[in-house]
Structures are given as structure tokens and as C-alpha cells.
Image (cartoon, rainbow, N blue to C red):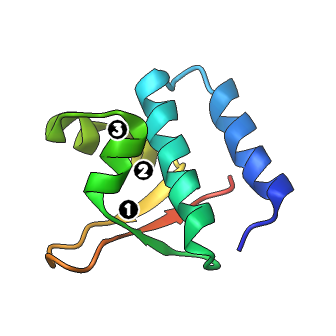
Amino acid sequence: MMKKDQILHLIRRACQDQRLNVWHLATYHALIELYAQSETAGDFYISRKKVMRLARISGLITYHKYIGELQTLGYIVYTPSYHPKMGSRIQLLSE
């Protein structure tokens, strides 16, 4: 589990990045919130439904766009799951 100051660093880094818009930030914040709830160290598992609800995203295309861009920009590693009960794996990258 990341410490509080490490999580704050992730948030500050994202907020200062001019490439990110409000939807990137909302999606990233939702991922950080789910990470904090998971109480695991390293990778954690998410459901698309929970991320979309927390980020206030209603469209699948929008969800996939911003998850993909967060990965491309180096904020996360996203490993999709095609299993109906197992969530997709996320790793938050610190740099």
C-alpha cells in the first residue's frame, strides 16, 4: 500500500500535467480512490462499472479512451480482463 505522501505525489503530478483534461483527472482520481479502498500493495483490480460511476463517465468509448490515454502517458499500466467476474488489473506508476 502506498503511503499518503506517495498518493499526494501522484495527484499533484497529474494536476500539473497540461496534457490532461478534466476527464483524465476524474478517471485517474477514481483509480486512486479504488486503489486506496483495495488495501493492497502494487497492482489492484477494478471493475469498469465502479470506475465509470466514480469518474462520472457514462459512455464506454469515453472510459476506454481515457484509460488508454492514461496508460500511454505513463500514469498507469492497464491489463484488461475479459472474465465476467474478475476485474481488470491496474498498476499506478509513480514516474
Alpha carbons under labels 3 and 2: distance apart: 8 Å
User: In the picture, which quadrant includes the N terminus?
Assistant: bottom right
User: Which residue is at a point 63% across and 35% down the rendered structure image?
Assistant: 14
x and y, in percent, of residue 31 in the image? 49, 53
**Of residues 73 and 8, which is closer to you in this image?**
8
Q: What amino acid does circle 2 point to?
A: Gln
Residue 73 makes an appearance in the image = no
Residue under label 2, please give it.
71
Residue under label 3, please give it.
66
**Of residues 39 and 6, which is closer to you in this image?**
39
Q: What amino acid does circle 1 point to?
A: Tyr
x and y, in percent, of residue 32 in the image? 57, 53
x and y, in percent, of residue 68 in the image? 32, 46
Q: Assess disc 1: are there few (<14), some (14-19) or many (≥20) residues with their C-alpha within 10 Å of its C-alpha.
A: some
**Of residues 72 and 56, which is closer to you in this image?**
56
| Residue 24 image-quadrant placement | top left
Alpha carbons under labels 1 and 3: distance apart: 11 Å
Q: What amino acid does circle 3 point to?
A: Tyr
